[in-house]
Image (spheres, rainbow, N blue to C red):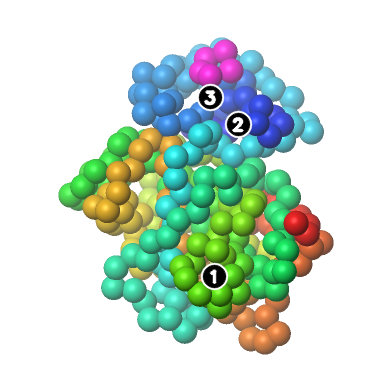
Amino acid sequence: MKLLRVGTAGAERPALLDAEGTLRDLSGTVTDIDGALLADTDALDRIRSAAEAGELPALDAAGLRVGPPVARIGKVVCIGLNYHDHAKETGATPPAEPVIFFKAADTVVGPDDTVLVPRKSVKTDWEVELAIVIGRTARYLESDEEALAHIAGYAVSHDVSEREFQIERGGTWDKGKNCETFNPLGPWLVTTDEVPDPQALSLKLWVNGELKQDGTTAQQIFPVAEVVRYVSQFMTLYPGDVINTGTPAGVAMGHPEPKPYLRAGDVVELEIEGLGRQRQELKDA
């Protein structure tokens, strides 16, 4: 299933995109798309049954904002330097274990919402990423199979980063990762039954129409199952938590000088095979 949330910010309603591309209203079936729903197999089965029976009313998508596909996200865990080609372009040694950092849940916005260039920013960068959405509470998982069974689905994530704040201002990466609007997510949460192999997905990103990133999840140093298993050794993952799994080569930081960092007025578009497409216009904060 392709689950999404539509409407004005803070007042989104749950919806489903059916196989014919028609937007269907879920508000009469479930209250929202959040961790509680994703952990409730009976509720998910009711959605599938209603969709198959043609019982879900259509929504007019014209002019309708798409919000983040998951409400009330508990935490956003991020994996850094997780693509062989990205580590190479930044001059970093591929890590022996996954690099973990966090984004605050309030950085998450809709897939087409405005992204704000922070005040005093000179190095705002783009990163297309595959996001994992957790569907079952995960603690100390022992195998890849167990890890995959705890995933509800996948989404497109834009891990916007400010490289000067992240790298040159001391401390941890968090200052360059947690600026407002720095994590567009969606348009859909695509359930795992529609993504048979998360290591065979193409990722692309364009800036002002120019292709900048063109990669595949096959290039991940730590694949999806290993990421979930590994992270569960250090923290409990709850339904509705999100894991951003890293970005392929092609970020602004990896370009020769002058590096083409983002500015107000730029337009970024990104997509992952089968998971949908995003588009953001940048403005000054």
- The Cα atoms of the two marked residues, 3 and 1, are separated by 34 Å
Amino acid type shown at disc 2 = Arg
Foreground residue, 213 or 202?
213
Residue at the far right: name it.
Answer: 265
Quickly name the residue at label 2. Answer: 5
Q: Quadrant of residue 195?
A: top left
| Tag 1 secondary structure | helix
Amino acid type shown at disc 3 = Asp
Q: How many marks?
A: 3
Residue 257 as seen in the image, left or right of residue 75: right
Q: Residue at x 47, y 71 (%)?
A: 171
Q: Which residues are magenta?
A: 27-32
Would you place residue 18 above or below residue 243 in this image?
A: above
* Dot 3 and dot 2 residues touching (CB under 8 Å): yes
Quickly name the residue at label 3. Answer: 32
Sequence order check, earlier mark of 1 and 2:
2
Q: Of circles 1 and 2, which is in front?
A: 1
Q: Quadrant of the C terminus?
A: bottom right
Using the rendered image of the protein, determine whether residue 96 is visible from the camera's viewpoint: yes
Q: Position of residue 261 (x, y in %)?
A: 69, 73
Q: Position of residue 135 (x, y in %)?
A: 37, 36
Q: Main secondary structure of the magenta part?
A: loop
Quickly name the residue at label 1. Answer: 166
Foreground residue, 45 or 162?
162
